[in-house]
Image: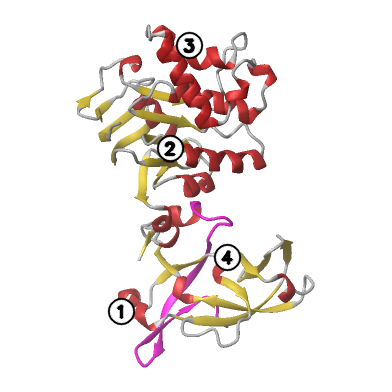
Amino acid sequence: MAAIELRDLWKRYDRVEAVQGINLDIRHNEFIALVGPSGCGKTTTLRMIAGLEDITAGEIRVGDRVVNEVPPKDRDIAMVFQNYALYPHMTVYDNMAFGLKLRKTSKAEIDRRVRDAADILNIGELLDRRPKQLSGGQRQRVAMGRAIVRNPQVFLFDEPLSNLDAKLRVQMRTEIKKIHRRVRTTVVYVTHDQIEAMTLADRIVVMNFGLIEQVGTPDEMYNAPKTRFVASFIGSPSMNFLPCRVVSGGNGSLALRLTDKLSLAVPPERAARYRSHLDREMVFGIRPEHISDRRPNAGSGFEEFEAGMEVVEPMGIDTMVFFSIDGIEICARARPRAVGPVGEAMPFTVDMNEMHLIDPANDRVV
């Protein structure tokens, strides 16, 4: 098992800078997820770690050695791809054993590793089948088993669940987490799905335009985003953003003026942090779950307002309610029984203790 260090890592394709001088430390046995929109550089970074892409500049260290010039087969890294890449004419057993046979591993050791991996993945009864006789989830387990038998220093996953249906993706997320607990090794997992990243990873790396926007735990990403991009990318539904002006509320207090008719008081404990932005145009960020149906006597930091419902989306335990403030669509999460017919005005409570104030000059959270 090994830690991974990326130092000033660049990748250029002609004039396109796919990865722009990133620095990242991945700890021994850590499960880290690279997440971001298409084209952000996450898969390119993964492929450079694997040795499948040449680096333009910088250094990659796996364990105690620099691997810039080391061929992929000698990096002691196993990779699981989006497509399962199984040999259709081979049984599950032979697919999992193939890499070990190429390395001249003894038959007894191959058998032990394959059966141990099959036991971990609950596919022992499938060893005599061929890939066409397996479901998508079973094929993905075989692909993972082929990586596990190698006992590598590092596992790399490139969007391994993208080809599965929604229910199976949820199931496989749970399975991958269980497997990581049993097979403790360093994992780098690439996905465009922020829910996968949140549920699987010890830490998340959010990338955008070849740069790292933020590195942190799922809790840090959700509750303490450093930029508007991270705030918008992490969380589903996405965070609401409204232009506002920081104004004085009297007696040393502050408020956010959203429209001529709507201002929301800033919690007193945040006033000192925001005071330097008094009378400036800023952006108010609040997640849908922090705007709810009216909660009387909710406590300090909770503000109330009213808005006309435009769209209602029942979700079972919650109902998503969409309305507009000064022409900007806002999403709230309400209790189903508190939601009336579309078109009616509805009272809302917003938890200002969970607000984010963003400087539009640099898109940084204050």
Q: Of the numbered discs in the image, which one, if any, rests on residue 288? A: 4
Residue with the mark numbered 2? 182
What's under tag 3, amino acid-wise? Phe
Q: Residue placed at 60% from the left, 13% from the top?
A: 91
- Say which mark, if any, is on residue 272: 1
Say which mark, if any, is on residue 98.
Answer: 3
Location of the C terminus by quadrant is: bottom left
Compare residues 250 and 96 and report the one nearer the observer.
96
Task: Inspect the image, locate mark 4, and give the three-letter code of the amino acid beneath it.
Answer: Pro
Disc 2 and disc 4: Cα gap in Å?
36 Å
* Highlighted range, magenta: 233-261
- Of labels 3 and 1, earlier in sequence is 3
Mark 3 falls on what kind of element? helix
Hey, which quadrant is residue 127 in on the image? Answer: top right
Q: Is residue 361 magenta?
A: no
**N-terminal label among 2 and 4:** 2
Asked if the residue at tag 1 contacts the one at tag 3, i.e. Cβ–Cβ closer than 8 Å, the answer is no
Q: In front of the other: label 1 or label 2?
A: 2
- Number of other residues with Cα within 10 Å of mark 1, as a class: few under 14, some 14 to 19, many 20 or more: few
Where residue 165 appears, as percent x and y from the top left, is 67, 37
Residue type at mark 2: give it.
Answer: Arg
Q: Coloured how?
A: secondary structure
